[in-house]
Image: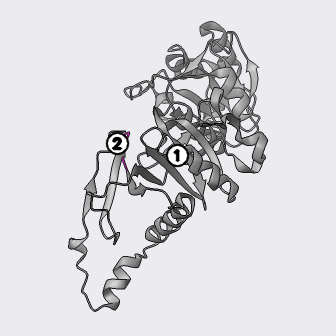
Amino acid sequence: MNSSPYSVTIKRLIEEIGLSSYYMPVDPDEVLVTVSDVDRPGLELVGYLKYYDRRYLIAFGLTEMSYLEMQSERKQLEQLEPIISQIPPAMIVARDLEPLPVMMELARKYHVPILTTSDTTSDVVAAIVSFLNVELAQRITRHGVLVEVYGEGILLIGDSGVGKSETAIELIKRGHRLIADDAVEIKRVSKRSLIGSSPENIRHFIELRGIGIINARRIFGIGAVKVSEKIDLVINLELWNSKKVYDRMGMDDEYMEILGIEIPVVTIPVKPGRNLAVIIEVAAMNHRQKKMGYNGAQELLQNLGMDINPEDIGKRKIDTNW
């Protein structure tokens, strides 16, 4: 596994997961975690270290501790030193178990922090992996607006001045929520999921031409904003082009790749008189229906007596120059 270009300090990990510092020989702000995996030593305790990675956090639970307690102190030293001598970021002892004297001896020798928790090993490992998957995720920042509409994360993209921020304001007034305006930080948190958020220094601010910068949270209330949201659909807003043929049936699936993940795309032409907020609401509900297996265009064609061959439904990658 390759290290992430991003990192999390042990201090932040302690605060976010609710761990306790049992032994801290170094400044927790200077110890960095760069991979999201957590190792529960099994074969490592009997000397098989071929795939052991010193960047992993090490978690000891009831199984590991009870096994070690069955061994003599000399045996414990032989089993633990090859692991701890590689100086992992920290050792975590679950279920409020007391670290073994040999563990303390090796932690002092190699300056490895020991953290404790009352949680079960599975629970604390799951919490750490979930947290680190987000914090260490591959990411990009792109121009756009991210809103939550009926529970769907909608990423609005398009040329500057096309009306993305104005549309976001109208959606907020209609009860939906803003995540990011202008700059959207997108993280790949799994092989299938992208999470979008705003850079902290501009979070919940919106630029409206002619008015200036507003704080959506202060004007519309805390219920009108959200810190992050999964990206379910991209809506590309573009000025109406009378020479272009726009999709009127919605049979074909268009998508774009973001960080290697395919995200469905809908292109909406913009011209005076079109209520973009309402159109985006309908797009969000229609996308949800498609995810649940229903396609209105297919039903209409079937009602008209036209057979639908699944192979006739196209899937096309689009380039939005975004």
Looking at the image, residue 312 sits to the left or right of residue 100; the answer is: left
Q: Quadrant of residue 11?
A: top right
- Give percent across and percent down for residue 220: 76, 47
- Give percent across and percent down for residue 285: 53, 67
Q: Label 2's element? A: loop
Q: What residue type is disc 1 on?
A: Lys
Q: Check disc 2 and report the residue beneath it.
A: 260
- Give percent across and percent down for residue 26: 67, 9
Q: Check disc 1 and report the residue beneath it.
A: 164
Q: Give 28 or 249, whichever is nearer the viewer.
A: 249
Q: Quadrant of residue 18?
A: top right
Q: Residues within 10 Å of mark 1 (few under 14, many from 20)?
A: many
In magenta, the rendered stretch is 258-262
Q: Label 1's element? A: helix
- Give percent across and percent down for residue 274: 50, 61
Looking at the image, residue 251 sits to the left or right of residue 125; the answer is: left
Looking at the image, residue 27 sits to the left or right of residue 297; the answer is: right
